[in-house]
Image (cartoon, coloured by chain):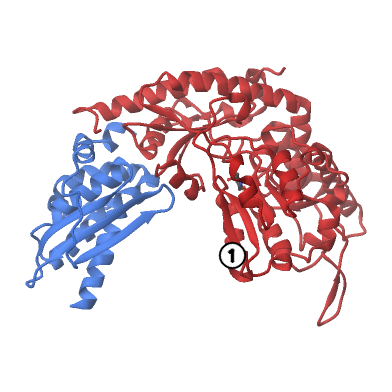
Chain colours: A red, B blue
Amino acid sequence: MFDPKVVRKDFPILERRVHGDKPLVWLDNASTTQKPRRVIDCLVDFYEHHNSNVHRGVYALAEEATELYEGARAKIAAFIGASGKREIVFTRSATESLNLVANAWGRANLKPGDKVVVTEMEHHSNLIPWQLVTQATGAQIVPWPITDDGFLDLEAMPRVLDGAKIVCVSQMSNVLGTINPIRQVADAAHAAGALVLVDGAQGVPHLITNVAEMEADFLAFSGHKMLGPTGSGGLWARAELLDAMPPFLGGGEMILEVWIDHATYNEIPYKFEAGTPNIAQSIGLGAAVDYLNDLGMEDVRAHEIEIVTYALDELRKIDGLKVFGPADPTKRGGVVSFWMEDLHPHDLATIVDTEGLAIRAGHHCAQPLMRVLGVPATSRASFYVYNTHDDVDALVAALGKARETFARGGGLPF
Amino acid sequence: MSLDDLYREVILDHYRSPRNKRHIDSGGIDVHRNNPLCGDDITVYVVVDATGVATDAAFEGQGCSISQASASMLTEQIRGKKVDEIEGIVLNFRKMMAGEEGPGEEELGDLVALKGVVKYPVRIKCAVLAWDALQEGISQYEKAH
Ligand SMILES: Cc1ncc(COP(=O)(O)O)c(C=O)c1O
């Protein structure tokens, strides 16, 4: 098991101080993670030594860049248990991957009246693309409700799956931390004749992910939430689905032969990689995957359960603080959303920022979920491999300071 | 950067005991605004009489202390004023939020307490939310009159 105090040393930014002399405490990992030296060096090395476009030139640098880029694809394929690297499409983000599926698969396959199931805990990026596509095709969105303790309501499963064409579900909620039972959902969805699109933006960085065991059809993921550069991400899909889908974006690289009024398309995954891709970023994501593999995803998960257990215990000691999502740390990831009775999340985030802590306040791109929870916003602390008990203690202390600030000049407002 | 500059006691007081926080069904100014970043939302109501005087002003909504206190102070500051005077207050408030020093601050009353927000750029949106609603309401009013 790695020691997060040692891991921290690989992340130059964690040496930073903010607001004068306050050590940075990075607790917004669900938004984006910091980058280890190895990933930063990889980007610098690429631009200093290998920079070239991929797949095109016949010169030495083009060959090197292509090899690095395709090498990263192979690393990612292995990381998530894909059967081959042709099933990995590089994109700019999880958002782009989800839009790819909604547009390429959705527009070709959805008819008026068809049902698209979207869980109530989806991030806007797995909802809005489907709103746009259902509006264009006449299909309809069916919400899949959640239970009071923050799980998918499995009793509702037969009803929502009835007649469904596709089920859009996050592997792990970016608000509740809930880990969804993807295999169970996939088995039921397939029995009902529906495909399953998994939003792995939160799950892939934090959980052991194996697409073969998941039995899903599509998995979108984001590089910058798993120690990789911004502008990296990807989509895994079964090869036969990718083969059958029309392209998403058109342009260079995704074609075989082009006439003025029509074209034939490249083989997968290149059919879905129009134009110059995010070459350096994708290679950097490969370096991030190497780093995570060296830590070991089993240990990444074990550390997360450990720190979330500690955080939940400490937060529950605070009067008037409510934590959302599953109570059992083994059923949730490293995301802890909470509400403090006498303090709006926005005020709270500002106050803890002055102590050097970066936490998130807001609706976390999940407005429908905020309505279900009955709050306008939550505060969210989210953990990763370099977070320690000290960070949790700093959070608890900063929450105390927030309380104090608001207690000045009178009693509590509520 | 001191937190006490941001969370002045007047602000906390307006947050704890908002003034004029109620619905007005006046058929007058009635504009809703929300801040999609943080979920704050505000509706500003103003009753304007035949002579162009704001005889009543109120707000409803929810959000952080800055957005709520700003709305509460706004209603206090504009009641009994003529629409063109209110436009002047809006202008002065926006100038203050843009960090411009100058005359006009004395007209802002308690609102001066919000000056500290200028040092927290991400929070300026919270402070101006009610003012965006008010300004929209005034321009609707002026079009209709
Ligand atoms: C669950 C979930 N899905 C999708 C996204 C979007 O990811 P990206 O930033 O890669 O577009 C996020 C991150 O904000 C997320 O938490």
Q: Is residue A86 left or right of residue B1?
A: right
**Relative vertical location of residue B84 with respect to residue A414 in this rendering, above or below:** below
Q: Look at the numbered disc 1 and say if its residue's Cβ is closer than 8 Å to ligand 1.
A: no
> Residue A294 at x, y = what percent?
78, 26
Decide if residue A226 is in sight here.
Answer: no
> Residue A77 at x, y = what percent?
82, 42
Decide if residue A205 is in sight here.
Answer: yes
**Relative vertical location of residue B56 with respect to residue A376 in this rendering, above or below:** below
**Which quarter of the picture shows residue B85?**
bottom left
Q: Amino acid at mark 1?
A: Leu
Which residue sits at x=82%, y=64%?
A253
> Residue A348 at x, y = what percent?
38, 34
Query: Residue under circle 1?
Result: A132
Which chain is home to disc 1? A
| Quadrant showing the N terminus of chain B | top left
Q: Is residue B104 left or right of residue A320?
A: left
**Relative vertical location of residue A10 with respect to residue A89 in this rendering, above or below:** above
> Residue A30 at x, y = what percent?
58, 38
